[in-house]
Amino acid sequence: MAIDQHHVTSELSRELSLFEITMMGLGMMIGAGVFLGIGNVIGIAGPGGVILTFVLNGVIAIMTACSYAELSSAIPYAGGAYNYTRIGFGRGASFLAGWMEWFASSVAGSLYAVTFSIYVIRYLDIIGILNWVPFPLPIAEKIMAVVIALFFFYINYRGASETGKVGAFFTFFQTLFLIVIGIIGFIVVIKDPTRLQNFQPFLPHGWSKLLITMGFTYVAFEGFEVIAQTGDEAIDPRRNLPKAMLYSVCIVTFTYVAVSFAAMIAVKAGSSGVDMVPWKWIGQFHERGFGEAVSRLIPMGNLLLTLAIIFASTSALNATIYSATRALYAMGRDQMVPSMIARISSKQKTPWVSLIFTGILVIIVATVLPTKDVASSASMMFLLLFFFVNLCVIRVRYHMGDELTYGFLMPLFPYLPIIAIVCQIVLAVWLIHMSLIAWIIAPAWILCGIALYFFYARTHVKITGDEIQVLEEEKVEITDTSYSMMAAVANPENALGILQVTRLLSQAKNAHLELIHMVQVPDQMPLSDADQYIWEGKEAIVEVMLYMQQYPVSTTIRYCRNVARGIVSAIREKKIDLLIMGWHGDHQSHVFRLGSTVDPIIERAPCHVIIVKNACRKKYNKILVPVSGGPNSNFALEMASILCHEKEGKITVFSVSTGKKQFDVKEFVEEQQKRLNISNDKLDYKQVHESNITQCILEESKAYDLVIIGYTHQPLLHQVTHAAIPDIVARECNTPIIIAKGTQRFESWFKRWI
Amino acid sequence: MDIEILLGICITFLGLGFILYLTIRSRRIIQKISSPKKETTTRVILKELQNGD
């Protein structure tokens, strides 16, 4: 969307319907993988292997499609993986994703050019047109691949492309043709059930070959991600993009399985020209195996199939060149690669420089590498790219789920992306058995990308609007302390509210303290205006510093689009062990348990967190610690032991039993006493039997100076949406209260990385 | 019937069934997530889905 100087906005008109974008994804997928792959897969894995290859790849692809669907519904702008990784992981990851996407799309383009040429040359050879050619057919195929690639580069340079509607109908009929082949296959089997014997032996080389064929043919499932590029032009993108991605993968998987089945039963054992078992006969033709099989299934099969492949591979080639060029152009526009790559032709209005670079890559790969290695390289790079996107969906939901507007949330989260990640790693590794060259090219390309990022992109890239930036920072040299605390201050009043607790904890832990203030900048405001809002935060920090002069204190003021995200990011960066925040106690949202800033911080911070409400005193004489045996009870008691008055203070561990499950509070107290080294006269316990736990705790708290309660335990990556007992107690308690959330070592490590 | 073929058929039907299930369930989730004007962060949607709204 562009904004001109008179504040009139311009944007692409939304004209692409659900049908059109679904066909776009289908058109990209049915480009080459299935036509080249079936023959090779049958030869490697056998008759049963070809069916299982496409089914299992379809299962992995639908899981990745769910990840893409969720991300595209929340970030419905052109850019795809490049955009998602920038938002999820930052600039470096975004560069790598764009770099991989450019290579993957270009190599896929090579594959489509090669597919086109193989089948066209095959057909021309069959009808006898090529007898005059003075060089072998494989060379003719390479020349044809270069010619068709150059033709479509010219088409893209001119900017001419078939309209969405025309392209959609071409793809519809291509898909229909393949489905018809599948249906004919089933009809043939019904008429001649002996053809089912073609499936014996089912897996002649064993189950392990499946991993190789799955990796090799995974490129047949790449294409749905191009739907993400239509975000700026699709109608109702938040709902239609996810639907289109899932529908296209579902349709294509069923189509591939039907077509594979038909190819296997197409050849009758013992028929003319078939001097071996059908699966070996088809397999011997490698990339042309599918064509040979179909020619025996339907009349004029050769011609019809050649026509279908011409349409499929050329429309996929056109779309891939467009997609690859756009990926490189986007990186040039953001100055991740030299900006001259983003140059647009003044006459044709197309990115001619990125077209040239993409063209060079496509042609080199198509002419130099054998077909098997081209397909494997494309598959490998897409596997790695999709692995990245599956990681991204977890991170984006985890970190920005409260900021983005989603049109779709995948079911079975986070299991689907985790399973997809594992499968993609396994397939990528196993590809080494199919193509060693792919296994050299892909890592070499990624390493080149990393080097390019560190030596060029990192210093040239444009800063984007949603990054967290440091406005002011004062660091103090840390000596003799390994414990870091952070206190988040919002304003002077809030700062004084947490001051005493901060001092006590800092002293007890001999900690280095970091004071942080986040300036939230709305999306509409440019980041350059952020510094006019730092004065309140500065005042807050100065107030705290007055009382903390004898402690080593660093300060930082940062701007961000979202306070919770900014604080969690700072915790990670500074390796904080404990965060202290104030909380006003008002609860107005039915969605959040404590608040829109507090909830995400408690869930995501990779450190201990304490939330302070009205606890301004220096020390407390009577502290109540309600416990239920959860992991946060230990941490709550530890905090109580620090905040309790050394001489007159007493801590009461309080447990309410409803009769269902008895918690042994006495054993708990004895354990904690030893662990925390608390004397007998300071620690006591009380257990009551009541049905209403919350009410009982609230009544009991009236007799105390301070309540410290553990936060409800949440499993990793799981969002608890209903209010729990600690939340209700925290909201309704009139006594000063501290909510304590501890973190385990593994949980802390996991949250730092995710 | 050969155990390998039986297993292959089971995996095929289970795999295709899983793909269909995921597609249909995802479509239902998209339909359930109502008007775009309403707040649709993950927290809101999960709450709606859990409450069966």
Image (cartoon, helix red, strand yellow):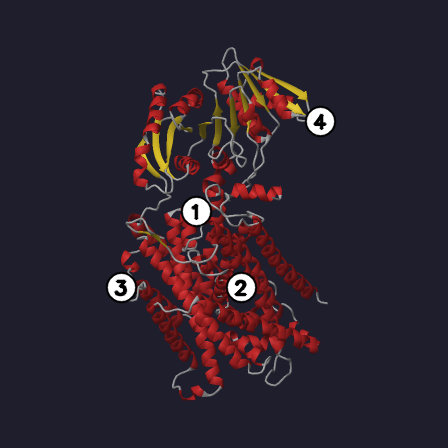
The Cα–Cα distance between marks 4 and 1, rounded to whole angstroms, is 46 Å
Q: Which residue is mark 1?
A: A88
Mark seen at residue A511: none
Place of residue A435 in the rendered image (x, y in percent of width and height, measured from the top left):
47, 65
Query: What residue is shown with label 3?
Result: A346
Q: Are marks 2 and 4 in contact (CB under 8 Å)?
A: no
Q: Earlier in the sequence, mark 1 or mark 2?
A: 1
Q: Is the residue under label 3 in contact with that under label 1 (CB below 8 Å)? A: no
Q: Residues within 10 Å of mark 1 (few under 14, many from 20)?
A: many
Q: Residue at x 42, y 37 (%)?
A: A572
Q: Position of residue A176 (x, y in %)?
A: 56, 71
What numbered label is drawn on residue A212?
2
Cα–Cα gap, marks 1 and 3 = 35 Å
Residue for badge 4: A659
Mark 2 element type: helix
Mark 1: amino acid: Gly
Q: What is the C-alpha distance between the residues marked 4 and 3?
A: 79 Å
Q: Chain of mark 2?
A: A
Q: Nearer the viewer, residue A394 or B46?
A: B46
> Residue A698 lies in what quarter of the image?
top right
